[in-house]
Amino acid sequence: MELAINKEKLVSTKPILKWAGGKTQMLGNIMPKIPETYGRYIEPFVGGGALFFALTPYHAIISDSNPELINTYQEVANHVDLVIKYLHQYKNTKEDFYAVRALDWTKLPKANAAARMIYLNKTCFNGLYRVNKKGQFNVPYGKYKSPNYCDENSLYSASEILQRATIVCDDYRSVLKNYAKPGDFVFLDPPYLPISEYADFKRYTKEQFYEEDHTELAKEVGRLQELGCYVILTNSNHPFVHELYAPYKIEIVPTKRYISCNGNNRKGEDVIVTAFPKSKPLLRAVPKPLPEQVSKYPATRFMGSKSKLLEQIWSVASQFEFNTVVDLFSGSGIVGYMFKAQGKSVISNDYMAMSAAFTKAMVENNQMILPLEEAETLLVRRKESDHFVAETFKGLYYSDLENELIDTLRTNIAAIKEPYKHAIAMSALIRACIKNVLVEFLHIPGNGIMTGEKI
């Protein structure tokens, strides 16, 4: 497990790049929120990596969708001496700046490409990293007298920390899916939702981060919390951010926008969202006796029936406060009936029509009955049936007379508008077929099996 560093004292390691939206100034607000212990540190929008370099974690996964940025971190981690060698070859002149800027970094040796990025970042206007739609760096020369673009001590310190990390160039969704595990600390610093009409937080890469992307990210935060990760997210103080992260703790923090051409617009507000794992109740299965009413449920030979586990199910369920149960796969209906006997309202469902009819009639239904006189009328042929049973199952299970009776009952039951009466009648017909007692309907009109019972 990682140990969070002393939150009163930040470590000396600093980011090697200046980055739009960098979190150096917010470290004092973020650090106290970091869990004391966690598994691994994961940052899929690493950017300048201010928090990563401040924490100096021993087990980390850092990532970004910017391949040039990731190449820089990988080369500083693995070939820092070579990166420094290339940096010493650069000069702080306007001519050299534009000459270096014109180079295609993908065609340079990787260490030189890393040095180029650091050099341009330290000598360009306002230290801004911005690319055009073709992915080409397009920030003008900064005209600084003595920019420290080859800070060897910082580079060696950063190299040591980066060597302990897994450095990935990928979409944040893939990174979190492949790496995040329960107990990990995930820091999310996505491109911000713009506040002003001039704000442009889609400049990190040639790809853009739209409103729907923020919606997807909010869903991912929920998944991570359910997984058991500690999540801290930053964004602009935008109403949509508050809407997306309403279920979590949100703190508003005043900030300065250092990368801005207009000094009057350098003040702003960020938010810090904290989403830590939900505490889960400790449940113990202590069997409890059930009401006698449960034993009166009609016995069935339903495969997978939970009739022998009712006490254990209730012992766990009874530890929660609830009034209504939704039984999505009701099967024989015995579990729903057990909850009903405990005074709970039950909503039942099953993809098998037979099971759905049983549980709707005997479990979900609380008041409705099918009076005997109404049941008797179902035996009387009122209109021609579709003869489906008589024609499809002729000579298989029942006599021709019984098949005709089934079709008559099916037709009459289908005309019942009240859903619980319909379920009672259909359940009685199904049970009569299963128990092979159709002959009783032929000789004893109005058999009580059609009435249903109220518990």
Image (cartoon, helix red, strand yellow):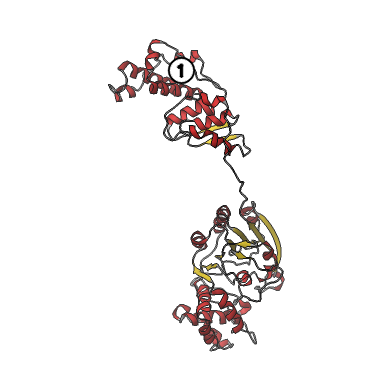
Q: Is residue 362 left or right of residue 238?
A: left
Q: Quadrant of residue 30?
A: bottom right
Circle 1: element type: helix
Q: Residue at x 50, y 59 (%)?
A: 177
The residue pinned by badge 1 equals 449
List x then y, in percent, for residue 31.
67, 65
Between 18 and 322, the one lying in front of the other is 322
Between 28 and 379, the one lying in front of the other is 28
Rendered-image quadrant of the C terminus: top right
Between 188 and 397, the one lying in front of the other is 397
Viewer can see residue 306: yes
Label 1: few (<14), some (14–19) or many (≥20) C-alpha neighbours in 10 Å? some
Viewer can see residue 20: no
List x then y, in percent, for residue 178.
48, 61
List x then y, in percent, for residue 355.
45, 30
- Give the vertical position of 19 relative to 364 (above or below): below
Q: Quadrant of residue 224?
A: bottom right
